[in-house]
Amino acid sequence: MPIFNWPRRYNVVLLSTLAVFVCYIDRVNISVAIIPMAADLDWGMQTQGMVLSSFFVGYLLLQIVGGLLADRFGGKVVLGVGVLLWSLFTILTPPAASIGLGLLLATRILMGMGEAVTFPSIYSLYSRWVPITERSRAVGLANSGIPLGTIFALIVTPMIVQAWGWQWAFYLFGLVGVVWFVVWQLMVTRSPELDERVTEAEREIIKAGANSDPVEAGPPIREFLKSMPVWAIIVAHFCNNWSLYVLLSWLPTFINKGLGVDYASVGWVTMIPHVASFIFLNVAGSIADRLVRSGMDVGKVRKLMQTIGFGGLSTALLIVGEVESVWLAITIMTIGNALGAFVVGGFVVNHMDIAPKYAGTLMGITNTAGTIPGIIGVFVSGLILELTGSWALVFQVTAGVTLFGLVFFLMFSSSKKLFD
């Protein structure tokens, strides 16, 4: 029976959001747990950066493959398998760390490979289940699983660490994915056509604005890479994720070491900007859909939302490294994250505008580029800190990358359906 008496596509959106939530509690917990891990295992900043960035090597490897598989065989099965795999390697993280750094890095890479299919699978599902007038809100809700999972991990991880040790943060969080998988199998089908409980009225709504064509031929990847609107999304995704991953990985350490907040309070202080992200991802998605429904050109909506998002975040990053007050820094980052959330109506949903039939594959391509900052940006930030000790420089570099992404997107993006 349905989770609630509501349209079946809402189950897809809700459970996809929960998948992102699980994805991020499993990903972010190490950003907090690494502080006692580093103390136990005698790691310097550079080693910590290596451990934090190793996840993204695996995350990089299966993005495109995940999108291809999701578009061909359905996002349901691909996402389900991915959740089980990353949950297993989350559980295996503590024993791997106790054996040696090399095995830990391999485990984190394998965990990243499991998580790599998450967004390509969701985009593939959404292109078949969600009409265009609801997509910004649906993508906004799914992406709000990022700050929601981050907040949960930031608050709960220190509690678990202090009660039972850092190892249990991985054991307990890894088990959550198994529960999600069972519900996913019961509640979601590959497409609306295969769900007997979709009403005829809902089926018509979905057909009017979503892609229902099966993918038989391979996606035009070469044509994607020749298209400047595709490169606009690729560059924006890269620049967006530079700030996302640097902040996810290093913000707890900045709060603890840079601003002098005690470890027990790190999660509570760090969560505040993520609360703003959670709220405004949904607000921004709703605003973007309303603008589209009002008749505003979709391309103008995408560029307006992108300008607010990248412009606001980069301004906050340029300021935050220069302040010494904990609460002033957190206030600045909260405003920056709130404005940064507006990109959900910009590049984040743009994949389904230009290539709805191949949304999963295109998301895999752009998220591959978006994963590179997780390797480079996180490691480079650790290197900057080790060599200079300057948090301001870390944030300034991040702001510069963000501004470049804004200019490129405004110059080359499109909202037209370019691939069919």
Image (tube, helix red, strand yellow):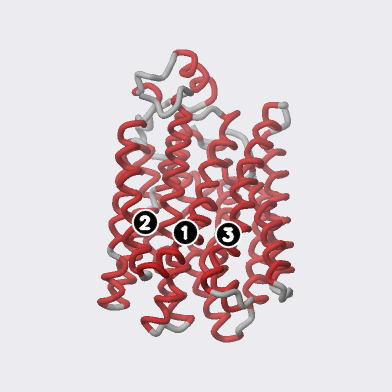
Find residue 380 and report its horizontal and vertical position in percent: 53, 75
Residue type at the position of mark 3: Met
**Which label's residue is closer to the chain start, 1 or 3?**
1
Is residue 119 at all visible to an observer of this figure?
yes
Q: Residue at x 30, y 61 (%)?
A: 91
Disc 3 on helix, strand or loop?
helix
Q: Residue at x 73, y 31 (%)?
A: 296
Mark 2–mark 1 CB contact (< 8 Å): yes
Classed neighbour count for the residue bearing mark 1: other residues with Cα under 10 Å, few (<14), some (14–19), many (≥20): many
Tell me the tag on residue 153: 1
Residue type at the position of mark 2: Phe
Q: Quadrant of the N terminus?
A: top left
Looking at this view, name the residue that lies furthest to the front.
163
Mark 3–mark 2 CB contact (< 8 Å): no
**Which label's residue is closer to the chain start, 3 or 2?**
2
Residue type at the position of mark 1: Ala
Disc 3 marks which residue? 271
Disc 2 marks which residue? 173
Find residue 19 and report its horizontal and vertical position in percent: 42, 45
Q: CA distance from mark 2 to mark 1?
A: 9 Å
Q: Is residue 353 above or below residue 395?
A: above
Q: Is residue 239 above or below residue 299?
A: below
Find residue 203 and report its horizontal and vertical position in percent: 46, 18
Classed neighbour count for the residue bearing mark 3: other residues with Cα under 10 Å, few (<14), some (14–19), many (≥20): many
Give the side of residue 121 with respect to residue 282, left or right. Answer: left
Q: Nearer the viewer, residue 381 or 147?
A: 147
